[in-house]
Structure formats: C-alpha cells, structure tokens
Amino acid sequence: MPVTERDGSVDLPLSGVTVVALEQAVAAPLATRHLADLGARVLKVERPDGGDFARGYDTSVNGMASHFVWLNRGKESMALDLKSPGGRQVVADLVATADVFLQNLAPGSAARLGLGAADLRDRDPRLVTVDMSGYGGSGPYRDRRAYDMLIQCEAGLVSATGTQNSRTKAGMPASDIAAGMYALSATLAALVGRAVSGRGAAIEISMLEATAEWMGYQLYHTQGTGQPPRRMGLAHPSVVPYGAFPAQDGVDVVVGVQNDREWTRFAEDFLGRPDLTTDPEWATNVARVRHRETVDALVASHTARLPADRLVACLDAVGVATGRVNDIGDVLAHPQLAARDRWRQVDTPSGAVHGLLPPFTVAGVELPMGPVPALGEHTEAVLRELGYSAARIERLGREGAISVPFESSLA
C-alpha cells in the first residue's frame, strides 16, 4: 500500500512526491525542508534515542533548538533503530514507496544498511537518490569528519572572510547551506528529467565542492593574478567606494558605487564635487582603488553630516545603492519583510513561532509551512499507511526497532 499524500497539497508544485530522508544537522534537512515547502511529503527517519542531533543544539525556541525549528517544519518524523532488522525493513518499505531517497550518513553507511544508490536504483530505476557528504564518496578525504566550519576552512572561505588582520568563518553555516541548496536544485532537475525520460538519477553532493563553487570569483582572480583578493571586511577589494560609512547618529550605512557612471552622480549630487568626475586621480574606479584611503575619508566626512534616515534618502534620490548595517533584531522587524507579509505562524511541539515564508514565491499559491514534528510523532501512522498491522507495529515497538510518542495508541 503506497504512502498517501498529505491533505491540501494537491495544488502545490511537488504535490504527490514522497521523499524519504535519513538526515541530520543542516545540509540535508535544509534541502528536504524546501522540498516540503514546495509540497513534497518528507518522511524524516531519526534515531529513537534523541533523533536528529540538531534537536539538541540549544533550547532557545520555547525549549527547542533553533536549528531544528528552522530546518524541519512540514516533515513527518519516524523514530527507527536502523541497527535492528525490523528498523531496516521499515526503511526499505518506505523507500519502496518513495520518489526521492536522500541521506547524509557517513560515507558507506547507507550501503551497509542496504540503501546504497546503485542497489536502490537497480530495484527502482525511477527513484532519485541523493547522497550528501563532506568530501564526496571517493578520494583521500572520503572518510574525514566534515562539519561546516571545517569545510569553510578547507574550501578557502575563511581565508576570504574577515579583515586584513583577522580571518573569520561566515556567521551562518555557509557550507551546509551551499550543499543543501545544490541538493535541492539537483533533486528538482532530476524530477523534471524523470518526467521526460521515466528514469530517476543518482545524485552526489559534496560540501567541499559546493563551497568551492561559491568561491569562484576568488579562484579565478587567484589563477589570473597569482594573488588572492585581500580580505576587506565590509569593503570590496576591487571597487571604491564600497563599504560601511558612519552616519551622524552612529548608525553605519553601506554605500556601493559600482561603476564610473554612478561615481559621476555620487560626486556631483551627493559630494558636491563635480571636479572629481574628471580628475584622473578620482574619475575611474581603478584610480579610486589606488587611492582608497583618501576616497573613503572624503565619503565618510560627508555621510557623517546626516542621520541615517536622511542619508539613505539622499543616496536613494541620487540613484546610489545604499543599505543599513542591520543586526538580527532589525531583520526581525524589517519593514520590507512586513510590507510583503512574509511572516507566518509555525506550530511546534512547544508552541507557535514565527517563520519566514519560503524565498521562492509562486503566483497564486501559498506554500505550506507545516508544523515542526516531535520525535517519532508519525511513526505509527505511517506504518499503518504502509499496511503494517497493529500487532506487527506493537512487536516492532517491543523489539526497540521503532519508537512512538507516549500518547500513541500503542503506549
């Protein structure tokens, strides 16, 4: 008996698509959360003893972990012990109903569980398999531990982030997010390809390779010059003026002059210095980069004369790109997000929170923002959909192959 689609998902882009995910942490859960956002049914397989370890990262969201709440809305949680024969059989039965099987276990672990991509696709050529790892399934780094910060370091992201005197990692899990987004886009492409050819695909995503792709500008610059771009903090190594400048009220405002046409408007209408549009020491970006400190000092002396609101309004009026240097609290209250009605209530086992709508807007469709699941919340219901009898489910529970919440009818 196939697993059925969720009620209310018939008008969504991925309505009718079932995803089985052996996932944890950030990269894989981000990919599958977006698949759920688009209407796929995502069955998340977790360990009975604590589940996805991201559940324990912190207790900041009404006692739940912020990473887990961010990444796991709209999914159904099944608590299965994959070390037990019964748990492995349940996963095999789930995958037999699936369109996509995605996993980010340690390299080789899925194959040892009988869930290797080649074997699964031999049994079902229409299946899309997605294997995610830190370094890929081959090569000398294959079996190395891979966390976001480690990959940011290996891929050179840390070397490009920070100030001239200090390297730093990105403030969000950039390597995890890069891998998750490439897993999402590749999965969607494979589903489109299957609709045409009738065949699925075996996809492999490496965090290192995803992050290295994001380093493209730095890689090509270094190839071409023999030197990596300088770390510049909020400034830009090859564009001036481009960075944060002080307003009168102490707020930092970013100013970005991308080309010499913009410089002409900026010099004439904001700085009041039309002479700087023809002076060879100022008129071209190449010259301004050479005299960065002088240019930046002049710009700062003008921005500091106005409070931030007036400064942003003036720069907008002359057609120069600008923005505030916000903190996270400012983003929560951002007027653009409020004006576009981007916040929705998301239910969790410990109470409702506010979450942002998915960043892809589909005209005429409200993408779902389903509840965040409790560990094992859907185990029993999904097994019943698969045709498991109450006696069989109870036996699996006694054997420790599955775990169900205390309010289950089996308790």
Image: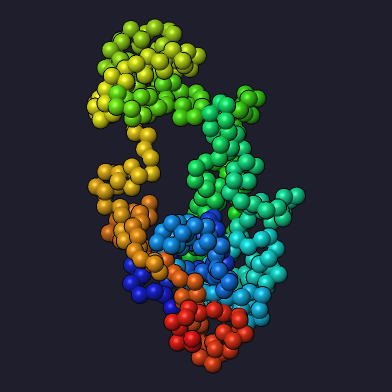
Quarter residue 117 falls in: bottom right
Residue 323 shown left or right of residue 383 in the figure = left
Outermost residue on the right side: it is: 140
Q: Nearer the viewer, residue 327 or 217?
A: 327
Vertical comparison of 145 with 386: above or below: above
From this viewpoint, is residue 152 visible?
yes
Residue 206: horizontal and vertical position, in percent?
62, 52
Residue 348 shown left or right of residue 343 in the figure = right
Give the residue displayed 65% in from the left and 25% down from the top.
226
From this viewpoint, is residue 182 visible?
no
Residue 355: horizontal and vertical position, in percent?
36, 56
Give the residue displayed 40% in from the left and 12% down from the top.
283
Residue 71: horizontal and vertical position, in percent?
46, 59
Residue 23: horizontal and vertical position, in percent?
56, 63
Give the residue displayed 60% in from the left and 80% down from the top.
401
Q: Nearer the viewer, residue 155 or 94?
A: 155
Quarter residue 215 falls in: top right
Q: Nearer the viewer, residue 399 or 271?
A: 399
Vertical comparison of 79 with 328: above or below: below
